[in-house]
């Protein structure tokens, strides 16, 4: 059986769903590896980050404002989504080696939706397969024995949280989430 290689994902977008709206940045950080025993990684050591050119004219100004990115600059200087998704896939494949790449995110549904859609749309396949995703919010709810509605960072024990700030910069937040994930994986509640 192949070991899992966990990639913490954060996406910033200019709207609620991919297609009509755009993923404007994507960050990945290796959170750790597991062959039955989890080993945390230094999440700042192996990372991937791209800012992307928008794919449509539609955007929600409030959603774009969360990232602090400038739409005109993204239109001018953002990476071509097809090239960026190809680079991301190649980087994940190299980084995972013989391991199985698995996305971890908090919450995964939003970030996974954008990344999976972009990978299928621009490369024709997902390096993570169709189900290589683990939701950190759900992981905490199960480990802590709380309802999903109570699985929020403000209610988590402080020792589980990253010491890093949540900045809404995709790479910063991927690194922060990688630390939270590693802490949860090593937690004995």
Image (cartoon, rainbow, N blue to C red):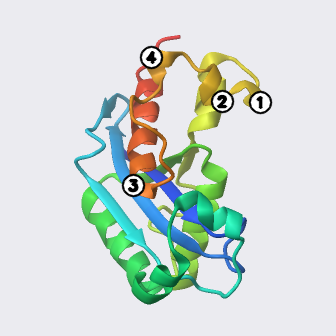
Q: Secondary structure at mark 2?
A: loop
Query: Label 3 neighbourhood size at 10 Å, few (<14), some (14-19), many (20+)?
Result: many
Query: Label 1 neighbourhood size at 10 Å, few (<14), some (14-19), many (20+)?
Result: few
Query: How far apart are the two marked residues, 4 and 1, measured between alpha carbons?
Result: 20 Å
Mark closest to the chain's N terminus, 2 or 3: 2
Q: Secondary structure at mark 4?
A: helix
Quarter of the rendering containing residue 186: top left
Q: Nearer the viewer, residue 119 or 9?
A: 9
| Contact? badges 2 and 3 (CB < 8 Å) | no
Q: Is residue 7 visible?
A: no
Residue wearing tag 3: 171
Residue wearing tag 4: 159
Query: How far apart are the two marked residues, 2 and 1, measured between alpha carbons?
Result: 7 Å
Residue wearing tag 2: 152
Query: How far apart are the two marked residues, 1 and 3, measured between alpha carbons?
Result: 26 Å
Q: Secondary structure at mark 1?
A: helix
Seen as rendered, the residue at the extreme top is 189
Mark closest to the chain's N terminus, 3 or 4: 4
Query: How far apart are the two marked residues, 2 and 3, measured between alpha carbons?
Result: 21 Å
For residue 149, the mark is 1
Query: Label 2 neighbourhood size at 10 Å, few (<14), some (14-19), many (20+)?
Result: few
- Position of residue 138 relative to residue 61, above or below, is above
Query: How far apart are the two marked residues, 3 and 4, measured between alpha carbons?
Result: 22 Å
For residue 25, the mark is none
Residue at left offset 28%, top offset 38%? 41
């Amino acid at each position: 059986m192949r070991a899992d290689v966990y990639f913490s994902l954060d996406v910033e977008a200019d709207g609620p769903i991919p297609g009509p709206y755009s993923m404007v940045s994507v960050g990945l950080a290796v959170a750790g590896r597991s062959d039955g025993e989890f080993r945390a990684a230094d999440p700042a050591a192996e990372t991937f980050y791209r800012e992307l050119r928008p794919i449509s004219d539609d955007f929600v100004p409030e959603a774009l404002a969360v990232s602090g990115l400038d739409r005109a600059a993204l239109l001018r200087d953002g990476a071509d989504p097809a090239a960026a998704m190809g680079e991301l896939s190649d980087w994940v494949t190299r980084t995972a080696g013989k391991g199985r790449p698995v996305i971890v995110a908090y919450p995964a549904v939003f970030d996974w939706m954008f990344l999976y859609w972009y990978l299928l749309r621009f490369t024709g396949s997902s390096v993570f397969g169709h189900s290589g995703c683990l939701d950190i919010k759900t992981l905490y709810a199960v480990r802590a024995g709380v309802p999903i509605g109570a699985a929020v960072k403000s209610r988590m024990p402080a020792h589980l949280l990253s010491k890093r700030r949540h900045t809404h910069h995709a790479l910063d937040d991927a690194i922060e989430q990688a630390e939270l994930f590693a802490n949860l994986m090593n937690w004995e509640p």
